[in-house]
């Protein structure tokens, strides 16, 4: 079992977490967003081989945080709390 480190609760087993997507995939804004831009936002994701920056939800405490993870080795750095600029109110 993989262990992720919530910045609020500490190390926990992976089944307590839910994947939230790529870090930096911001929702398009404005009334004139094209279908192509929406499709890009909704369906196209990074799938790096190696280092990845992701958003995760710790379902136990309800906090959302950023996590750097290596997709080859499955090593995960301790999670980092998100700032308002990164998508946290």
Image (cartoon, grey):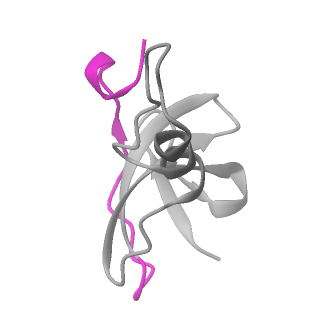
Instruction: State yes or no: residue 11 in magenta.
Output: no
Count of number-bearing discs: 0
- Front position in the image: 79 or 37: 37
For the point 43% across and 20% down, which residue is it?
Answer: 29
In the image, residue 47 lies at what x, y percent?
A: 44, 73
Quadrant of the snapshot with the N terminus: bottom right
Left of 81 or right of it: where is 45? right
Is residue 32 placed above or below 51 in the rendered structure? above
Instruction: State yes or no: residue 84 in magenta.
Output: yes
Quadrant of the snapshot with the C terminus: top left
In the image, residue 31 lies at what x, y percent?
A: 50, 13
In the image, residue 36 lies at what x, y percent?
A: 50, 46
User: In the image, which residues are magenta?
Assistant: 71-89
Is residue 15 placed above or below 2 in the rendered structure? above
For the point 65% across and 50% down, which residue is it?
Answer: 17
Classified by dominant secondary structure, the portion drawn in magenta counts as: loop
Q: Quadrant of residue 66?
A: top left
In the image, residue 19 lies at what x, y percent?
A: 60, 53
- Front position in the image: 46 or 28: 28
Is residue 60 placed above or below 67 in the rendered structure? above
For the point 33% across and 43% down, which residue is it?
Answer: 24
């Amino acid at each position: 079992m993989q262990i992720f480190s919530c910045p609020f609760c500490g190390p926990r087993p992976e089944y307590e977490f839910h994947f939230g997507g790529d870090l930096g995939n911001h929702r398009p804004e404005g009334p004139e967003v094209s279908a192509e831009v929406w499709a890009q936002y909704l369906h196209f994701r990074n799938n790096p081989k190696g280092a990845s920056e992701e958003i995760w939800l710790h379902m136990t405490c309800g906090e959302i945080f950023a996590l750097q993870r290596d997709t080859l080795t499955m090593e995960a750095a301790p999670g980092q709390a998100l700032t308002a600029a990164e998508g946290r109110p």
